[in-house]
Amino acid sequence: MIKVIKAVSLTLLFFAGITFAMENTQSLVLRYFGYETPPIDLYLLILVSVLFGVIVAGIGFIIDQWSLKKVVRQKKREIESLEKELRAVQEKGRDLVNSREDG
């Protein structure tokens, strides 16, 4: 059911994008501190802006994943160290119990 909803949503989004592009073909020139772009269609400007946002978000996601993997590696090392310490304490406890039973 979720796959159907996703497919329908993506189809509607695609249809909306196509109709938006067909309706907004007027050209505009962007100016910023004396710099000027060649005429750009409005739909193309919006599409490029959205794609740029997706790329920036993707880069942010990748950086976040790297930092999370680093934290996971550190926690695994910490767990291994604590397990090693626990085994040593358990062996000491066994040795202590065995020495009391023998003596």
Image: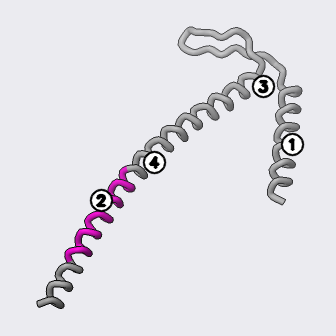
- Is residue 84 highlighted in magenta? yes
Residue 45: x and y in percent read 71, 23
Contact between labelled residues 2 and 3, with CB atoms less than 8 Å apart: no
Contact between labelled residues 1 and 3, with CB atoms less than 8 Å apart: no
Contact between labelled residues 1 and 2, with CB atoms less than 8 Å apart: no
- Disc 4 and disc 3: Cα gap in Å? 37 Å
- Disc 3 and disc 2: Cα gap in Å? 57 Å
The secondary element bearing badge 2 is classed as helix
Q: For mark 1, what is the residue? A: 11
Magenta segment, which residues? 74-92
Residue 40: x and y in percent read 74, 15
Instruction: Please name the residue shown 70% across and 14% down the image.
Output: 29
Instruction: Please name the residue shown 75% across and 22% down the image.
Output: 44
**In the rendered structure, which disc, 2 or 1, sits on the residue that comes first in sequence?**
1
- Is residue 48 highlighted in magenta? no
The secondary element bearing badge 1 is classed as helix
The amino acid sitting under disc 3 is Tyr
**Front tag of 4 and 3:** 4
Question: What secondary structure is the magenta-colored segment mainly?
Answer: helix
Where 91 falls versus 39 (above or below)?
A: below
User: How many residues crowd around disc 2 within 10 Å: few (fewer than 14), some, or many (20 or more)?
Assistant: few
Could you tell whether 25 is left or right of 31 in the image?
right
